[in-house]
Image (tube, rainbow, N blue to C red):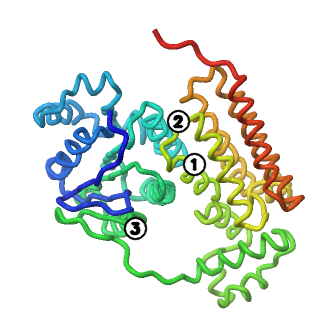
Amino acid sequence: MPTSLRTVRLAGEELDEHRHVVALVEGPHEAEELLLPFIVEGFEQGDRAFHIVDPELRDQHVERLRESGIDVEAAMAAHELEVQTWADSYVRGGRFDGTAQFDFLRSVLVEGRSLGYPRTRLIGSTEWAADGATAQELVRYEARVDEFLNTVPDVVVCTYDLTRHSARIIAEVMGVHPVAVVGGLLRTSRGPTRETARDRLLTAASKLFHDAGIQATGVDSIIEAAGVAKATFYRHFPSKDDLVLAWLRDPRTRWFERAQAQASATGAEPRDEVLLFFDAVAEWLESEKYRGCPYLNSSVEITDPAHPARLVIRETLDEIGGYFRTLVDAAGYAEPDLLGMELHALMAGAISLAVARQTSAFAVTAKEAARQLLVEAPRRPPAT
């Protein structure tokens, strides 16, 4: 099985460092014609293929793969090929949950590396998504995927049927994908951008929340630091609580996604990725001058259980714990829930002590404690 990464081609062009692509098509036939060469190339290079398709078209899709010369049965037996339907991923339980789908996608990519494949080429079709609230949540999910894929070797192609979505949704989708295939041609989907008033408010809030705390930072000081009018603030954020929520959800605040991307960029085994994550945390603490985790800091300040930020904080901390659980489960440990919780506790303690003492030494010590945990933790018996 090849271990080196080679150039990826799509629509007759080479992909550069951007590996999150939106393919705008008119119907499933056009999607297949566009993607089959990309799929075949992946098998030739030893990459893993993971496809999420319309349940009604799964059998047809598998047959087209056979006709393209792919030994489907052998590839599936080796977990080199997985063909799942929307019900297995995007709409498990009958509805789309962006957080759950992001965890699913991340676990798929981690699993690919744990199986020894240098890269996963994931294709997901989105015809299930109707315009409205579901489509808006899908756009937010795509933005998180784009952030995560910045430094990992995997390629994700999302197909959007132009006959199923409004022009507004297509425009928003293109905004969160760095590369697009339009009319069968590959092109960059993002042009030069400038910081919007909303971005300036979030940037100002982030600095002030870190420096003075959420409770001590007033709306007027945020408006002054951002250089916007008061009416502009309230047009974007009806209240300070809305701004706090937006800040906690902002990709720039979600430091752990960048640390995860850095840890997984080397294609290390899941067990080793756990330790690399502690290294990434140490580097992040130093680069941020030991300002600490916004979610841990906010949980201390915001004590009202009914405050909407409490749910975001809890979900985010659960997401970080879920990352550890996914890794140790993929590494074959017998008690992934317990071990994931222990690793999460080590990391959170290291961050808190690093802030208190202004040194990353605690992250280094926590990494060695994590290494010992991984050595001593029981493993599942090998599959027969």
Q: How far apart are marks 3 and 1 (CA)?
A: 29 Å
Residue at left 58%, top 57%? 258
On screen, residue 225 above or below 269: below
Horizontal side of 298 relative to 270 (left or right) equals: right
- At label 2, the amino acid type is Glu
Q: Residue at x 19, y 65 (%)?
A: 185
Does residue 326 appear in this view?
A: no
Q: Residue 172 carries which label?
A: 3
Report helix, strand or loop for mark 3. helix
Of callouts 2 and 3, the N-terminal one: 3
* In the foreground, 251 or 126: 251
Residue 8 visible in the displayed image? yes
Quadrant into which the N terminus falls: top left
Quadrant in which the C terminus is drawn: top left
Q: Residues within 10 Å of mark 1 (few under 14, many from 20)?
A: many
Q: Where is residue 270 in the image (x, y as percent from the top left)?
A: 55, 35
Give the Cα distance between marks 1 and 2: 10 Å
> Neighbour class for label 2 at 10 Å: few (<14), some, many (≥20)?
some
Q: Is residue 245 left or right of residue 152?
A: right
- For badge 1, the amino acid type reads Ala
> Which one is earlier in the sequence, the residue at label 1 or at label 2?
1
Across and down, in percent, residue 297 comes to: 81, 58
Which residue position holds label 2?
Answer: 269
Determine the residue located farthest toward the left in the rendered image: 67
> How far apart in space, not on screen, are marks 2 and 3 (Cα)?
35 Å
Q: Mark 1 points at which residue?
A: 263
Q: In the structure shown, which secondary structural element does the residue marked by tag 2 occupy?
A: loop
> What amino acid type is highlighted by mark number 3?
Glu
- Residue 255: quadrant of the picture: bottom right
**Around disc 3, counting alpha carbons within 10 Å, would you say few (fewer than 14), some (14 to 19), or many (20 or more)?**
some
Residue at 28 percent of width and 54 percent of height: 7
Task: Decide: is 79 above or below 233.
Answer: above
